Amino acid sequence: MKLKGKALRLPVNDNVNTDYVISGRYKFKITDPKELAKYIFEDIAPNFYSRIKKGDFIVAGENFGCGSSREQAPQTIKAAGVSAVIAKGYARIFYRNSFNIGLALIECDTDSIEDGDLLEVDIKDGTLINKTKNVKLFTNPIPPVMRKLLDDGGVIRHFKKHGGFKF
Amino acid sequence: MGKGKTIAEKIFSRHAGRQVKAGDIAICNVDFCFGQDGTSSIIIDSFKKLGNAKPFNKKKFYMVIDHSAPSPNMAVSKIHQKMRNFARETGVGMYDIGEGVCHQLIPEEGQVVCGDLVLGADSHTCTYGAINVLSTGVGSTDLAITLASGKNWFRVPETVKIIVNGKIPKGVYSKDIILHIIGLFGANGCTYKSVEFYGEAIESLSVDARLTISNMAVEMGAKSGLMKADKKVLSWVKKHSKRHPRPIKADNDANYIEVTKLDISKLSPQVACPHTVDNVKSVKKLKDIKIDQAFLGTCTNGRLEDLRIAASIIRNRKIHKDVKFIIAPASKKIYLDAIREGLVNTFVTNGCTVLSPGCGPCVGTHCGVPADNEIVISTANRNFKGRMGNPSSFIYLASPATVAASALTGKITDPRKYL
Ligand code: SF4
């Protein structure tokens, strides 16, 4: 699976928590992910939604998605048209939630990626090419369990297809 | 390298039906699972998507209405109604408005006992680690899978051992200890890992005070914050549950990825400053920070002994005229005990606003959203920008004593002179 889009940077780099992804103010009021997407990152980057073009990547530093277990966080990212998050590392609940709903998370050193850079990611072989800078970045391979969930289209489809977990 | 096992490795081995160690992927049986009103709507949707699914055990799944309870608006009312209907249709358990915060109710109601493996669709599920339960937060879809099958998959975590030694000084509480630890480790310090807390300081604490420490393990990224089942824990669990506890001890030669020893005999009251939980400073360093609101409550510090500490500080004193002091007992039982002990009387007489049991303003849905530029001192576990409903406000986190003392003076205050 090849993904192509531009890098979107946030004003916060490390420890972007799920309250920042989608505020508790909205997640209790709005249940439609497409509607929630309009408020994505609102507390740290107002109007962020208008910057997203389908297929773009969110690029961040360490411990992305820490804090609350809200599944609305990866749901909102996915519904906003983002194809994958690229960060140095992820908090564990967010990590599971994302693959469970079929949102890919790429782990790599993101320091050299700037806002607006055009990126190409191959989920299969783990290559990440920064087209703007013309450099290839090393990514950590997606663990087999997560790959399986992603390939099956999320945990619900995985569970139905195999009648349980099959790793 | 030791051959022995950590608490997490043993609990996962027990529930996987085979011996597993850190790094292994294990499919495990889960003893109890739950969701709250911020996560249950998606649990129900995901559960229905599984097609023809039935709850694996009606008594082992509960939904708790605590995050916005009672409902502040129509949209939330609709979610609550959906939860009630689902409980009626399927016969699963439900704690409705006024019962309390999930993480207080679940151990208090005796739903979980030592040695259990528990999943909650809420990140602070790690709270029950204090009573020797491996409990951890997951998202709604993960929870729906467990609701349908009684199982889930886990990556067995590495374990960090934290030994807290020293006699706890006057005016310092379990909240100060865990804030200090989070300050040292950082928000990312224990990501994907299990933490085991030991040491004479931990042993000297009541079980209620220990719950505060395990509650905040997730603020450094941990999957669980475990403690051993000593006499205090066993008698606490026996008092609250009819179920038989099956405590788990780590082996002496267990493998730890990191061992940290702390001496807290000289620790001062600690405060987490905006906008991250690991931005921790001694209260002594915070001079002249005026506050507009104080909040006492939540799954971190809304227990009876927390209310007692606060009441003892404000009794016969006056809340500062510019401070709104909001108090939410963590459960109905605590609320009733506080009424019986006269604590509620002290609070209300002295100008505090006491809310019904629940999360209160912790997550910004209702009942105490700060205005722009307002400063709040709170006993909660998170101070992220916007957490209490307004991204232009500032949240400081501290112990019930520090919060109560600050409510008296109108600025962040060392509680020791009021004790
Ligand atoms: S009190 Fe706050 S942290 Fe605890 S469960 Fe409720 S919203 Fe979450």
Image (spheres, coloured by chain):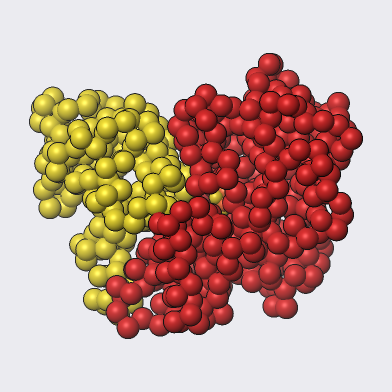
Q: Nearer the viewer, residue A144 or A56?
A: A56
Residue B334, position in %: x, y? 75, 58
Residue A99 visible in the picture:
no
Residue B189, position in %: x, y? 52, 39
Q: Nearer the viewer, residue B396 or B56?
A: B396
Identity of the residue drawn at 24% across and 51% down: A34
Specify whether B172 is left or right of A118.
right
User: The C terminus of chain B lies in which quarter of the figure?
Assistant: top right
Residue B115, position in %: x, y? 64, 68
Identity of the residue drawn at 37% across and 44% down: A22
Return the residue found at the far top.
B288
Q: Nearer the viewer, residue B380 or B171?
A: B380
Question: In which quarter of the view is residue B102 placed?
Answer: bottom right
Palette colour of chain B: red
Specify whether B87 is left or right of A13.
right
Badge count: 0
Residue A82 visible in the picture:
yes
Identity of the residue drawn at 41% across and 42% down: A23
Palette colour of chain A: yellow
Residue B261, position in %: x, y? 69, 38
Specify whether B57 is left or right of A109.
right
Identity of the residue drawn at 56% across and 80% down: B59
- Is B184 placed above or below A94 here? above
Specify whether A70 is left or right of B300.
left
